[in-house]
Image: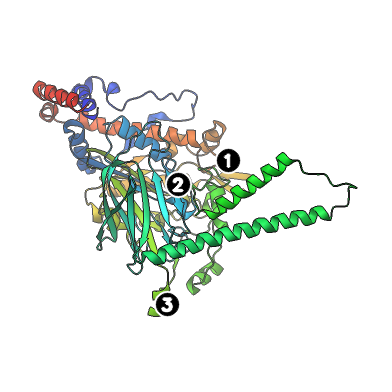
Amino acid sequence: MIRLFLIVALAVLSAFAKDLTIAPGSYSLDLTKYDFIDTTVNIIQFPKGNEAFTPFFNKMDTLVFENRGQVRIMHVGGSHLQADVISGRIREHMIKEYPGASAGRGFIFPYSAARTNTPSSYASYYKGIWDKNKNVQREISKPLGLLGIAVSTSDPRAEITLMLDKYNSAPIWGETRFRLFGYSDNNDVVPVLRVDSTDIYGVHDTVSQSYVFTSPRPIDTIQIQFRWIDSLKQASIAQFINDSLLQDSIARADSLKADSLKKSSNDTSKVEKAKIPTNVMNLQNAQLQNAQLQNAQPALDSMFQGECDVLDTACLAREEAKNKDTIVNNRCAELAAKKANINYEEGEQDPTNNPDDHCFTEPVAVPDSVKKNARPRFTLTGILSENDAPGIIYTNVGINGAKVHDYFEEVCPQFEKEMEYFKPDLVIFAIGINDANVQRFNDKQFREDYDRLIERFKKVNPNVAFIFETNNDMFRKIKRKKFVQHGNGEVARKSFFMLADKHKAGVWDKFSIMGGLGSMAKWERASLAKKDKVHFNLTGYNLLGDLFYKALIQAYQDHIANLPAQKKQESKPTAQQTTANAKDERGNK
C-alpha cells in the first residue's frame, strides 16, 4: 500500500502549481466556529529565507519521489510535548497521509516507572521499585541524556513494557531494531528483550552506553526484563520480597479485621447487634482475598494517572511533590534554603530565570566489601525504536516544567551521545513557556540559552533545520482562582523571531495564530484550553497539531512548486516505472 500511495502522490505532484489544494496532506479544517483564530498567519515564516531547509527538503524529495531514505524530525519542549498530544497529532498526519510511511516510533521511555505521565500515544507499564531523575529536579544524581529523564532500579523483579499500538484503532507500528540507552553500575545486570516468550540479548556498545536489539519479526510491544549475572541471587531476593509483601498484606488484613471486631464489640448503642448477612460476608471475604493477591504482586502501572488526567499537569505536579526525595547534598540544601521550589505547571511565579538552579549529588566512594553485597543496579535513559523501511520518524522530547537550560550539558551530559543515533533533519523547538512564566523575563538570557542549546544539535548534524514555535498566550496566576494577562508572551515572540533571524530558521507564530495577547481566555471559553490558562485540552492540542502540520506541509509544497522544471521532469516516474511499481505492489499484497 505504501508503494501504491507513493505512485499516486507522484502523479498528483506532477501537476505542482495547477492545484496544490489536492496535493497529499491536504485536508479540510473547519475553523468557522473559532473566529478568534487568525489562519492568515498559519504559515512557517522564514525571516532569512528557507535556504537552510534545503537538506531537509531534499531528503523529503527523495522519500516522496523515489520511496527511498528516512526523514527524522524531533519536537522538543516541556509539558506540551511530554503529553505528546500536539506532536502525536502531527506524527499521525505525517505517517498516515504524507508521504504515508513510518520508519519507526523514535525515542520512547517508561514514564510510568518515573511516576509521571506517559505520552498519550502509547502505554507504559512497569514492575518493581524504580528511582527517578529528571532535568527539572533541583537535585540530580544520575547523568541524563537526550530525553532529560532516567529511571534506576535494584529490584530483582524489575521489568518494563511499552505498548506502541495500545490506543490505535489499527496497528501502525512494526519495529525491528531497538537501542536501549543505559548502564549497570558494576556490570552485573543486563537488559533482555522478550519476544514470543524468547529471550533476546542485545549487543553491548560501551562507547554509547547502550544495548542494540534486533527482533526476529516486527513488533509493537517492547518488553524488557533485567537479568542479574548472579541469577540465583536474583531469584532468591525476588522470592523474599514477594513473600514479605504477602505476609505484610495478610498482617494488615488481620489487623483491619481485628479493629473492626473490636469496634463492633464496643458498640453498645444498640441492644442487639445487627447480624451481617451471609452474602455480604462472602463479598467482603472475596474482596479481602483479592486485595491480598494484588498486594503480593509487583507494582504495575500504566500512564501513572492516579487521580490525575493525562493532561492535568498541575495535578501531576502535586502527585510528584508527595514523592519528593529528601535533600542530602550540602549544595542542594543551600540551594533549597535560598530559593523555594517552583511549580511551573500550577502557574506559580519564579522571580528569576537562573540556569544555575540545579545541584548534582557528588559520587561517594563505596568500599569493595559493600559493593560485593549490594544489589545490582541498572539505570535507563531512553529507548530508540526503529525499522529499516523508508519513511518518517517523528519523535517528541519533553519534560513537564522544562526550561531551555534544563537541556544543557551540565544537566544532560549524554545528550549528544544519544542523539548521534537519531541525527534529526528537522528540529522543532517548543521550549519557552516555562522560561517566560516569570515576573521578570530576561529575554536576552533566554536567547543566549537557546544559542547554547542549538550548538548541541549542530554538533551532531551541522545541516539540521530549525523551526521555532512561539509560546502560546497565557495568563499569570496572582491569587487563588485569579489570573491576569501575561505580557511576556509578546516579549518571547519577538525573541523567537530574533533567534530565527540569527540561525536562519523558520517560525510558526502560535501566539499570533491563537489571536495574540489575551486570546487564551477565548480558547478556554471555546473549550479548547484548561482552566490553568497555560495548557490546552485534548481538542485544543489536536487543533494546534492540525494547524502546524498544515503549515509545515504548505512550506514543503511551496518548495516543490519552485523546483526547476528539469528537476520536476526528472522526478516524474516513467510509464514503465509506474507499471513495474504497480506489478510489484500487486505481488507484495
Tell me whether the residue at label 3 lies in contact with that at label 1, contact meaning CB atoms closer than 8 angstroms: no
Tag 2, which secondary structure? Answer: loop
Q: Which residue position is annotated with label 1?
A: 531
Q: Which residue position is annotated with label 3?
A: 370
Q: CA distance from mark 2 to mark 1?
A: 22 Å
Callout in the foreground (3, 1): 3
Q: Which mark is residue 243?
A: none
Q: Which residue position is annotated with label 2?
A: 118
Kind of residue indicated by mark 3: Val
Q: For the residue carrying disc 3, how many other residues have a C-alpha within 10 Å: few (<14), some (14-19), or many (20+)?
A: few
In this orientation, which residue lies closer to the viewer: 351 or 571? 571
Quarter of the figure with residue 544: top left
Q: Is residue 566 visible?
A: yes
In this orientation, which residue lies closer to the viewer: 135 or 514? 135
Query: 78 left or right of 48?
Result: right
Kind of residue indicated by mark 1: Lys
Kind of residue indicated by mark 2: Thr
